Amino acid sequence: MFKHFIRLQWRSFFRSSSFGKGIALKILMIFFAIYMLVALIATGGSIYFVLRKLFPDQSPMWTISQFMVYWVLVELFFRYFLQKLPVMDIKPFLIIPISKSKITHYILGRSGASMYNLFAIFFFLPFAVVLLVKGYAVLNVLLWLVSILAIVLCVNYVNFLINKSDKALFVIIGLILTFYGLDYFDIVPIKGFFGPIFHALYAYPWAFLVPVALVFVVYWLNFKFLRNRLFLDDSLKAKKQEAKSSDLAWTRRFGDIAPFLQLDLKLIWRNKRTKAQVFISLLFVFYGLIFYTQDIYANMMPMFAFLGIFMTGIFLANFGQFIPAWDSAYYSMMMSQNIPLRKYLDSKAGLISVSVVVMFLLTIPYAYFGWEALAINFGSAIYNLGVNIPVILYFGSFNKKRIDLDKSPLGNMQGTSGTQFLIMLPVLGAPIIIFSIFYLIFSVEVGVAVLSIMGVVGFMFKNKLLDAITEQYRKKKYGMIAGFKEKNS
């Protein structure tokens, strides 16, 4: 029966109406996956020597065991957005005599062979090979590798249990930030607490039974959860639930653009792909810690300019580059109404402006690493507000690919075209080049001043720029409507 399911899935893949249209993208994704696997193999094979150099007084196995708690939590976080349960179209099977248990086992078994599980294996397997070459006990290393595989499968199946819960996502984010904060400020030794637990999987070979047993427990919970929902009537009956929504009355103070702001805020909160952009933006506030804490970057002011533009404009880039494709499901309806297009664009500009201000406020603590960091972040925020917002809105007029918000949020290339790659040149590259030129010729102060002045000039010509962009949207109106109607684009 499993062979029959696999054959049907294979035929469904090649007979899909979107197969031919998306073949180039599929090939690109395959090459990207191969690149990732090769990079993971290289990293896994070299991590032993890196850890030995960084921590000469510790065994690499002990060192990596200390960080594995973060690996589990971070993998859960990314899988929440990336991985979906591989549910085939099961409705036709529910009216014929096929065991629901077999269908459920196939779905869960197929998820066990997911590409996401291979990523971890391709990292830890080369690491285990190096351990064996370096003389570590063969039995201990092999059973430790079995334990790692079991942990990967546990993460895989736990993700399916929590994937529909926003509360679970907040708990994961909270644990990551709390653990890191407790460790960083030496309040509680999180690595010292969890390190021995994960190291025991190597030190005591019999300990591999614990993660293996957990796999069976989580698999059984998933099996019961799915098996109890494989009923045709369950999919046909109307779902009754209490509608919870906010009227967002506070947006009324923004005047004519208030209705558009309300739609954008509801769209962001109700859909995983848009919500993911918010969480990713907030997480990238910590991106500066990678560079500000390293002495090698202390005098590299162009790198500080990159961080300033990137951190204060991360939501601008991630969300703004897909305007107006976020509204593609109902864009034609909006354009058929008596809706001022200028007000629509004003609302997008206002939403992005708020995000830039919020991101700048969140980067203020980086003043701890020097006044240059704060000054450059301020100049970058002004530049993003005055220059990059009109630029991102202008490039939005070239978006003609539909986005279905009910699909997987991350790892989803839907709506992506060459425009998204070209837009990074003026948004990210131009301000860095401008700052670098004036910094190298004059000083940091002059570079920051030039970025700020350009942002202020953008504010002064805001109305004229938006008028020109509105006219561009009018010219592209029917092309965008036609493109958004192509569901397989």
Image: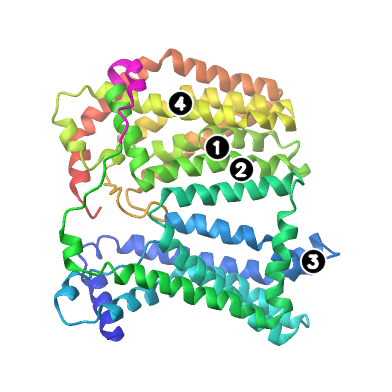
- Left/right of residue 14 with respect to residue 96 in the rendered view: right
Task: Identify the mark nearer the N-term, 1 or 4.
Answer: 1
Q: How far apart in space, not on screen, are marks 3 and 2 (Cα)?
A: 26 Å
180 to 381, vertically: above or below: below
- Left/right of residue 319 with respect to residue 297 in the rendered view: left
| Image location (x, y in percent) of residue 319 | 40, 38
Q: Can residue 318 be seen in this view?
A: yes
> Crowding near pointer 4: few (<14 within 10 Å), some, many (20+)?
few
Task: Identify the mark nearer the N-term, 2 or 4.
Answer: 2
Q: How far apart in space, not on screen, are marks 1 and 4 (Cα)?
A: 16 Å
Badge 3 amino acid: Arg
Asked if residue 254 lies in the magenta stretch, the reply is yes
- Left/right of residue 370 with respect to residue 461 in the rendered view: right
Q: Nearer the viewer, residue 273 or 320?
A: 273
Q: Nearer the viewer, residue 40 or 115?
A: 115
- Residue labelled with disc 1: 310
Task: Identify the mark nearer the N-term, 1 or 3.
Answer: 3
| Residue sitting at the far right | 57
Disc 4 is placed on an element classified as helix
Identify which residue is drawn at 36% across, 65% down. Answer: 85
Asked if residue 433 lies in the magenta stretch, the reply is no
Residue segment shown in magenta: 245-257
Disc 1 is placed on an element classified as helix
Answer yes or no: do the residues labelled 2 and 4 have beta carbons within 8 Å?
no
- Residue labelled with disc 3: 52
Q: Nearer the viewer, residue 425 or 30?
A: 30
- Residue labelled with disc 4: 354
Disc number at residue 287?
2
Disc number at residue 335?
none
Task: Identify the mark nearer the N-term, 2 or 1.
Answer: 2
Answer yes or no: do the residues labelled 2 and 1 have beta carbons within 8 Å?
yes
